[in-house]
Amino acid sequence: MEYLSDHVRLGDDLASVVVLDQTLLPNEEQYLTLRTPEEMFEAIQALRVRGAPAIGICAGYCLAAIAQQRSRELDHPYYLRELFRQAQYLGSSRPTAVNLRWALDRLLRRAIGLTDAVAPPGQIAAVLREEALTIHREDIAMCRAISEHGLTLLQDGDGVLTHCNAGPLATSRYGTALGPLLLGKERGMSLRVFADETRPLLQGARLTAYELHRAGVDVTLICDSMASMVMKNGWVNACFVGCDRVAANGDTANKIGTSGVAILARHYGIPFYVLGPTSTIDPDCPTGADIQIELRGPEEIRSQFYAQPMAPAGVKCYNPAFDVTDHTLISAIVTEKGICRPPYGQSLAALLR
């Protein structure tokens, strides 16, 4: 089985970050070397690297690279102040994805501890680099565990509908929502997958179909508006989606259109599962109403991926990147630590203890 690996990694010079430009897939595989904070910010905001866990991995490497660069230029206390400034800047690139802020805060906590011990900037940079690598290693292990837990929810011959992309490209190995499907393929299971194209940026068409097809999984691409039809036809036994933030009560933010899939699944009596690492659970966010939803530009709807604009240039567009699925529509939340079921206020809190 063929997987893309190391699509987000620290550069060989330790002062840059190398990412696979996902905006060019599936037609071109091009790696970018990010050297400045502005290039790093743009790569995250423009979705050249995307997927909540992958954004967290990338953010860790970005701050570690900046720490390496600045260690040659600044002394205390300016060094730590600069790291905080750059972390705040990078953290503003995608406000909905909790992993982004989580990874940056994790590195900053390590930097604060070392600064209290009056460690030199070069030593702080080395520790932050190792912390970023640890985040990446942990994600590989988490994705494998999520895949194992998720696979217990499926039987040989099942049909699964997925929305957006939560495979290796959005994480590290295996992925979250796609992890059980790839693991099932490895173990000889016959699973049928229906991948929503996921308008407006077509992550399902460009990335999910790409990953599953390369892995030899039986995948059928459908328009978002066709989800009801394949469910009504009896072809779907479960829905698997990833997540960008899970509130304390179980409300879940994921790619726009996810909540519609959950509503359809409830209507047709199909279980709807959310898969993601515990790092996407935000205990400080009470409900989905407290999740900031990123709004993106109108060109993504009107013209991106089209040879010619598909709507009048002056027409108004509303383009939220995410929506929130109510916890009452979610059958279970699958994490690396196990499967949480309602009531989520209790089960998620117990998981994080």
Image (cartoon, grey):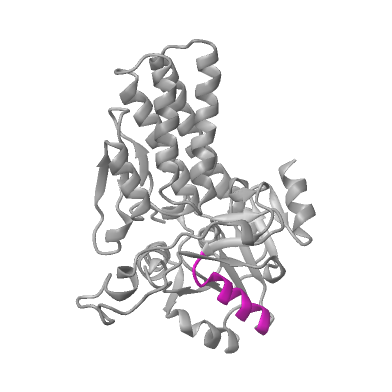
Q: Quadrant of residue 2?
A: bottom left
Task: Report if residue 159 is visible in the image.
Answer: no
291 drawn magenta: no
Task: Report if residue 16 is visible in the image.
Answer: yes
Residue 200, how many percent across, how many down? 38, 71
> Which residue shows up at 29% across the image and 18% down it?
73
Tell me: residue 124, above or below residue 187.
above
Residue 274 appears left or right of 122 = right
Magenta span: 255-267
Tell me: residue 75, above or below residue 138.
above
> Which residue shows up at 36% across the image and 47% down it?
7
Residue 110, how many percent across, how many down? 53, 24
> Which residue shows up at 59% across the image and 71% down it?
239
Q: Quadrant of the C terminus?
A: top right
264 drawn magenta: yes
Residue 30 appears left or right of 197 = left
Q: Main secondary structure of the magenta part?
A: helix
Q: Work out which residue is located at the far left of the displayed protein and give it.
A: 307
Which residue is more in the foreground, 90 or 155? 90
> Which residue shows up at 55% across the image and 85% down it?
228
Count the labels in the image.
Answer: 0
Residue 220, how many percent across, how many down? 44, 77
Residue 72, how many percent across, how many down? 30, 17
Q: Quadrant of the N terminus?
A: bottom left
